[in-house]
């Protein structure tokens, strides 16, 4: 599979996820980190105490391998 084909597969997947409400946080040719939901800073900026404690950000790592297979896995960040 050519690099251009792999980039196209990733681009198509990103377009589909954008419709679902995800945003791209980081991207390379064959991999992208996408997120859905409000970050703690965004919730704090909204000045709504209820939203401060509700919801979370869901992050997915999308990867297109050399064979053109798209994989998606949830990524969780642990601070501290």
Image: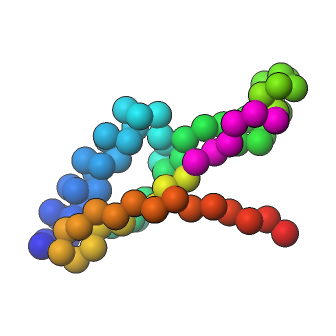
- Quadrant where the C terminus sits is bottom right
Residue 42 place in picture, x, y as percent: 73, 35
Along the viewing direction, whichever of 25 and 35 lies nearer the viewer: 35
Range shown magenta:
53-58
Q: Can residue 26 be seen in this view?
A: no
* Position of the N terminus by quadrant: bottom left
Question: 75 left or right of 14?
Answer: right
Using residue 1 as the reference point, say whether residue 30 is left or right of it.
right
- Image coordinates for residue 6, horizontal then vertical, percent: 21, 65
Residue 35 x, y percent position in the rendering: 54, 47
How many labels, in total? 0
Q: In percent of the image, x 18 and y 75: which residue is there?
A: 67
Q: Which residue is pictured at 24% across the width and 61% down the height?
A: 7
Q: Which residue lies furthest to the bottom in this view?
A: 66
Task: Residue at 52%, 59% (x, y): give it.
Answer: 74
Based on the picture, tell me whether residue 59 belongs to the magenta stretch.
no
Above/below status of 61 relative to 34: below
In the displayed structure image, the side of residue 67 where residue 17 appears, left or right: right
Residue 63 can be seen in this image: yes
Up-down relation of residue 72 to residue 54 (above or below)? below
**Nearer to us in this view, 78 or 24:** 78
Above or below residue 42? Residue 9 is: below
Vertical relation: 74 (above or below) 51? below
Picture quadrant where residue 65 is located = bottom left
Nearest the eye: 31 or 59: 59
* Residue 10 found in image quarter: bottom left
Residue that lies at the very extreme toward the left in this rendered image:
1
Colouring convention used in this rendered image of the protein: rainbow
Give the prevailing secondary structure in the magenta stretch: loop
């Amino acid at each position: 599979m050519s690099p251009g084909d792999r980039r196209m597969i990733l681009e198509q997947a990103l377009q589909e996820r954008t419709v679902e409400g995800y945003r791209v946080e980081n991207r390379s040719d064959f991999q992208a980190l996408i997120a859905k939901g409000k970050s703690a800073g965004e919730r704090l900026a909204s000045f709504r105490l209820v939203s401060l404690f509700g919801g979370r950000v869901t992050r997915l790592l999308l990867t297109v391998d050399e064979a053109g297979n798209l994989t998606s896995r949830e990524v969780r960040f642990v601070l501290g």
